[in-house]
Image (cartoon, helix red, strand yellow):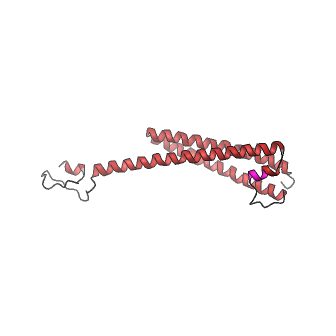
Amino acid sequence: MAGKTVDQLTEELMAVVAREAEQLDQLWQLLSRQQRFLVEGDVAGVTANVQEQAQALRIAHELETERLRLLDEAAVRLEGDPRALTLSRLAGLLSGSYAERLNELRATLVAITKNIERTRQQNEMLINRSLYHIGETVRLFAGSMATVPAYSANPSVRRPGAALVNRIG
């Protein structure tokens, strides 16, 4: 490891970033599929999908960690501050095909990350909307003012806000 050149580190970094982009794209596809499962009410599909998302996130995190390690190592070789070196800054220090490819990979990561965030927000909205509708259904079924069941066939004893099951008598 100590003998790697900046070019070798850059090539290794580009391979890691390309794999990271593939992994994030897979995560985006999983989130898109989750959307369909949420709309269709496919609980088993959502459950399996969430497990796949967890696996994809774990791998993406490992690749991100490796990317950051390689950037730190490249910064040391370039005698710079490891905390300040990013893909775009490294691309600016390099020339030719390395700089081009790093900029393309960085743009891909940014685009996929934006897609993931947008789809995640849409899924969150779908989940929150579903929870709201479930809560409203439970409230209507149970009665908004029902605290103590009133089981009576006599309409004068029943409370108007009592739960549906309590009004049946």
Q: Residue furthest front?
A: 92
Report the side of 114 relative to 74 (left or right): left
Quadrant for the N terminus in the image: bottom right
* Count of numbered circles in the view: 0
How far from the left and from the top, in percent, is residue 26?
A: 62, 41
Report the side of 48 relative to 158 (left or right): right
Report the side of 113 relative to 71 (left or right): left
Q: Residue at x 24, y 49 (%)?
A: 164
Q: Nearer the viewer, residue 11 or 85?
A: 85
How far from the left and from the top, in percent, is residue 147?
A: 26, 59
Q: Residue at x 65, y 51 (%)?
A: 61
Quarter holding residue 68: bottom right
Report the side of 152 relative to 16 (left or right): left
Q: Residue at x 84, y 51 (%)?
A: 6
Q: Residue at x 53, y 46 (%)?
A: 50
Residue 84 drawn in magenta? yes
Q: Nearer the viewer, residue 58 or 118?
A: 118
Residue 162 drawn in magenta? no
The stretch in magenta equals: 82-90
How far from the left and from the top, in percent, is residue 103?
A: 74, 45
Instruction: Indicate whether 42 appears above or below 61.
Output: above
How far from the left and from the top, in percent, is residue 7?
A: 84, 48
